[in-house]
């Protein structure tokens, strides 16, 4: 059967019809509450009759008013919405500090095995020996890769891991009669979670200035150390993408002053299998399984932030943890000396443990080291290809897994880092991280990860170069109006914050009509 | 290595462009004594089918919920998740997107979060909800800290019906805090929390249905708290109960925290789950976590952005309301899709079915010699007192292939008064045959 071509337009854009609902490829999808209603449902359940006598008089009287959709309607709503998102699978996502690497689907498949997904955190431990074995195996990999004495798996995300690590430090110092230590040193280049965590625990935060070369000066740390200092929170590799060359001296100085070294391990991806943080003198470090070990970011979580601990801090790990017992593996849920206690209801992010271990076994020790080296190679390649047009704030050392530029190259063009980032959207790339780290003016932090091929990196660099030259040639309008090729133009964030609309409400007209 | 695109030739070519002799030259900032000075002794890379074999062997050592009668609850519940939910959340555009910091190309995630916030606000009867927290337990600790900021008072009173793990998390978050008062376990639904509210109290925390399954009176608690200028924090671990029970917002709650796992999310041995948090409009600026708000773009089209970020750590650093960054986005998506599939009609039927099965379970258990049901009121969960110590009894049931609930002593090992108590839940997945099998086994074990 041949295709009927009658009436088929031969050119593009000949219809002259501007659709208000967009196209199926770039939809304007109404809200769930605008397409569904309280009668529709996509789940078939028997309508059983119940009496209210066991509800204590608390049965619901206010209507739920929850919109429902049948299955085909729901499928279409969420598929159409999904098309409005950029994702790793659809294009490069060079967000510095976020490590948007490929998420293998084997991980997803394994996490859904019933022996992992359909087990309850409080069923007898005799019935979950395989799960405990998996946690043990993951712990072994994490401790081996970091050369540390213990690991607390339970933190739900990186920031939660930071909290746990700093709580362990506080518990250790309280136990040693060192409660007068109330100051935490945090370099200016740190992630915002570091000072927020320290403040959360009642510490005062003392910033350490960055050196002109983007690294932390051991002398500045020594000058800031005192008997009141509890710990330093240092990111390594740091947020400028640099390995701290004096990290061992810093650790020694911190320890000599009786303080602990908390390492923010957000950038462990650059050094896994190549450098063991335990060899650098760290006491605690969280590892973002959703960055380094490829568990999906899911539009903002769930993450997982296990914390490796030095021998000095190991006794202060929270419950629960897995231990070998006479009758197989045990889950210790109540420690004899509950120094720290419990930071989440159950065993942490089991679903992420499965994905991370699957990834580790796939890569092996050799593959993880190769991945770290490729991540560093890719970032240096971008830096090498672009440094003749972009401005590099720190050039004394090779970069690690991220290439950092500042906005000096845009001086006088009328184009800001934000404009530049939005123009990248029009070229099919997700923007880099903007304005972070704070120590660099108009920062552009680019993290390609090991997942990008040379062809993609070349195309990205070609686009970046062309954009930079265009900005310098005076074509500011291209940037200030960007993005044009996206589901939305720039959004008014000021308006959103000034009079917040945080949920859908039935239009007033409809309310009146209903009355 | 299947996840790494470069060939050896490409690596060499790239090093040439960089001007580096070899890969080690790029690690020149690393102190020599720390660079590759070890043999990890870890296995080498492995083909997909071998990894799968290994993981399947570990999985097979566990007794999955579907393997037999299942009555475990106590903060995590085994419900059916429609196939559509799991299919949709695995779409690349949902699964492999980052936090929507570039709103122009993240409208899918942002609109979903706006819809999610609306669903949670409607469920709880509150003005606003955030875009999720890690789970119910950490959410409870965050709510307690939020209440302190709002009232500028310190005293916190936790009900004896609060999940013991939640209580322990609050304790850890408020380390060594003399202003935290934890009332002793109240398995019979008794409670004297109202006597503990004074003019220094920031908030009281009440769970309903409580850990033991009893339904608690939020209205009297709210009135008593408000009379002293304190806030009422309501905690819900079984969110399906809101299909049948009155919304906390309608009864005077100031902050509602819930574990959202029951809708859209599997048991997963404890995580990932998702924390729901909702509050009054006037408290938004002290609420932790991300918020999505509606706005317009440069052409006037409706769109959504993350908003009020001046509360958050990446802007406020040490002055932030919380250190939370990554939350539970994909679990929130699963929740939102499942809730959209249910709608009011389906959600109400689901809640009724849960309660009906729990009524059958309670009646059947009450007829077993040596078993006493402690609840007059419940939604889908209840506590029984058995004539023998509960922990060993649960082990013996497990040996028969029945997961018969949670012995309270597992969570409260230091309290001898709870040694013979078991918390059990029924859901829409519980069958009459499951209940019959449990009761027959209990009768034999307790004979």
Image (tube, coloured by chain):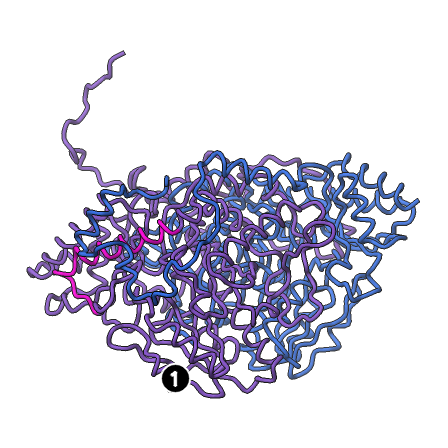
Please tell me in which quadrant of the rendered image residue A503 appears: bottom left
Instruction: Give the crowd class for mark 1: few <14, some 14-19, many >=20 residues within 10 Å.
Output: some
Query: Which color is chain A depicted in?
Result: purple
Question: Which region shows up in magenta?
Answer: A369-393
* Magenta stretch contains residue A385: yes
Give the side of residue A227 with respect to residue B171, left or right: left
Estimate the x, y position of residue B71 in percent, counting from the top left: 73, 45
| Front-lying residue, B106 or A401 | A401
Q: Is residue A479 shown left or right of residue A296?
A: left
Q: Nearer the viewer, residue B273 or B8?
A: B8
Q: Quadrant of the C terminus of chain B?
A: top right
Residue A405's place in the image compared with A87, above or below, is below
- Which residue in the structure is indicated by mark 1? A222
**What color was chain B assigned in the picture?**
blue
- On what subunit does the disc labeled 1 rest? A
Q: Position of residue A47 (x, y in %)?
A: 67, 37
Q: Quadrant of the N terminus of chain B?
A: top left
Q: Position of residue B227 (x, y in %)?
A: 66, 78
């Amino acid at each position: 059967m041949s295709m009927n071509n009658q009436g088929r337009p031969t050119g593009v854009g000949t219809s002259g019809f501007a659709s208000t609902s967009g196209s199926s490829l770039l939809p304007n999808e109404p809200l769930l509450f605008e397409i569904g209603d309280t009668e529709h449902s996509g789940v078939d359940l028997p309508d059983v009759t119940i009496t209210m006598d066991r509800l204590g008089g608390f049965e619901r009287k206010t209507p739920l008013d929850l919109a429902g959709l049948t299955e085909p309607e729901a499928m279409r709503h969420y598929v159409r919405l999904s098309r409005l998102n950029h994702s790793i699978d659809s294009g490069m996502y060079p967000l510095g500090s976020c490590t948007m690497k490929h998420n293998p689907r084997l991980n997803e498949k394994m996490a859904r095995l019933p022996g992992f997904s359909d087990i309850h955190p409080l069923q007898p431990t005799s019935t979950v020996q395989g799960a405990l074995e998996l946690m043990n195996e993951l712990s072994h990999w994490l401790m081996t890769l970091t050369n540390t004495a213990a690991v607390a798996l339970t933190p739900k995300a990186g920031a939660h891991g930071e909290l746990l690590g700093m709580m362990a430090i506080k518990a250790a110092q309280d136990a040693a009669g060192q409660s007068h230590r109330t100051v935490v040193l945090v370099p200016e280049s740190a992630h915002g979670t570091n000072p927020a965590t320290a403040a959360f625990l009642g510490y005062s935060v003392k910033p350490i200035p960055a050196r002109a070369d983007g690294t932390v000066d051991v002398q500045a740390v020594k000058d800031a150390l005192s008997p009141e200092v509890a710990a330093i929170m240092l990111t390594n590799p740091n947020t400028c993408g640099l390995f701290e060359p004096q990290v061992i001296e810093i650790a020694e100085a911190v320890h000599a002053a009786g303080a602990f070294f908390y390492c923010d391990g957000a950038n462990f991806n650059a050094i896994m299998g190549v450098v063991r943080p335990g060899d650098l003198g760290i006491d605690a470090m969280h590892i973002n399984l959703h960055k380094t070990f490829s568990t999906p970011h899911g539009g903002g979580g769930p993450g997982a932030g296990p914390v490796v601990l030095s021998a000095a801090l190991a006794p202060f790990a929270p419950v629960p943890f897995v231990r070998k017992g006479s009758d197989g593996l045990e889950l210790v849920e109540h420690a004899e000396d509950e120094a720290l206690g419990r930071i989440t209801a159950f065993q942490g992010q089991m679903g992420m443990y499965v994905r991370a271990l699957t990834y580790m076994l796939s890569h092996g020790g050799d593959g993880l080291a190769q991945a770290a080296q490729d991540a560093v190679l890719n970032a240096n390649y971008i830096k090498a290809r672009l440094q003749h047009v972009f401005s590099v704030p720190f050039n004394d050392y090779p970069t690690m897994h991220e290439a950092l530029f500042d906005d000096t190259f845009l001086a006088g063009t009328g184009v800001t880092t934000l404009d530049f980032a939005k123009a990248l959207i029009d070229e099919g790339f997700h923007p880099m991280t903007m304005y972070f780290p704070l120590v660099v003016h108009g920062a552009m932090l680019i993290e390609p990860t090991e997942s990008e091929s040379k062809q993609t990196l070349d195309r990205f660099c070609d686009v970046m170069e062309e954009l930079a030259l265009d900005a310098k040639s005076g074509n500011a309008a291209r940037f200030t109006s960007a993005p044009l090729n996206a589901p939305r133009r720039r959004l008014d964030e000021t308006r959103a914050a000034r009079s917040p609309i945080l949920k859908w409400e039935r239009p007033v007209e409809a309310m009146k009509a209903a009355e | 290595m299947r996840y790494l695109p470069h060939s050896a030739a490409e690596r060499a070519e790239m090093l040439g462009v960089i001007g580096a002799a070899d890969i080690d030259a790029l690690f020149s900032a690393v102190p020599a004594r720390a660079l590759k000075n070890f043999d990890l002794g870890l296995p080498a890379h492995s083909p997909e089918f071998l990894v799968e074999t290994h993981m399947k062997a570990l999985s097979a050592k566990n007794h999955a919920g579907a393997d037999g009668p299942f009555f475990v609850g106590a903060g995590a519940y085994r419900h059916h998740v429609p196939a559509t939910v799991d299919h949709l959340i695995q779409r690349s555009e949902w699964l492999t997107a980052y936090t929507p910091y570039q709103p122009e190309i993240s409208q899918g995630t942002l609109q979903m979060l706006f819809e999610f916030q609306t669903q949670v606000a409607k469920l709880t009867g509150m003005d606003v909800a955030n875009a999720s927290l890690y789970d119910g337990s950490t959410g409870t600790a965050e709510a307690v800290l939020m209440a302190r900021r709002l009232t500028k008072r310190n005293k916190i009173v936790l009900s004896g019906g609060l999940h013991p793990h939640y209580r322990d998390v609050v304790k850890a978050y408020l380390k060594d805090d003399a202003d935290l008062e934890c009332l002793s376990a109240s398995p019979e639904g008794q409670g004297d929390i109202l006597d503990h509210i004074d003019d220094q109290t920031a908030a009281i925390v009440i769970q309903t249905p409580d850990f033991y399954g009893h339904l608690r009176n939020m209205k009297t608690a709210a009135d008593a708290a408000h009379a002293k200028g304190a806030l009422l924090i309501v905690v819900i671990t079984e969110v399906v109960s809101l299909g049948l029970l009155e919304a906390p917002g309608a009864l005077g709650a100031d902050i509602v925290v819930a574990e959202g796992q029951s809708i859209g999310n599997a048991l997963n041995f404890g995580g990932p789950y998702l924390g729901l948090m909702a509050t009054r409009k006037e408290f938004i600026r002290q609420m932790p976590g991300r918020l999505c708000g509606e706005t317009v773009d440069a052409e006037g089209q409706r769109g959504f952005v993350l908003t009020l970020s001046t509360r958050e750590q990446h802007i406020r650093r040490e002055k932030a309301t919380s250190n939370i960054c990554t939350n539970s986005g994909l679990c929130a998506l699963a929740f939102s899709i499942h809730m959209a599939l249910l709608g009011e009609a389906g959600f109400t039927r689901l809640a009724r079915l849960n309660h009906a099965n729990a009524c059958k379970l309670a009646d059947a258990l009450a007829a077993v010699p040596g078993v006493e049901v402690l609840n007059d009121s419940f939604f889908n969960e209840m506590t029984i007192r058995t004539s023998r110590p509960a922990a060993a009894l649960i082990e013996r049931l497990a040996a028969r292939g029945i997961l018969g609930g949670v012995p309270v002593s597992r969570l409260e090992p230091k309290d001898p008064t709870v040694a013979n108590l078991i918390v059990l839940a029924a859901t829409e997945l519980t069958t009459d045959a499951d209940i019959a099998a449990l009761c027959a086994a209990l009768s034999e074990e307790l004979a």
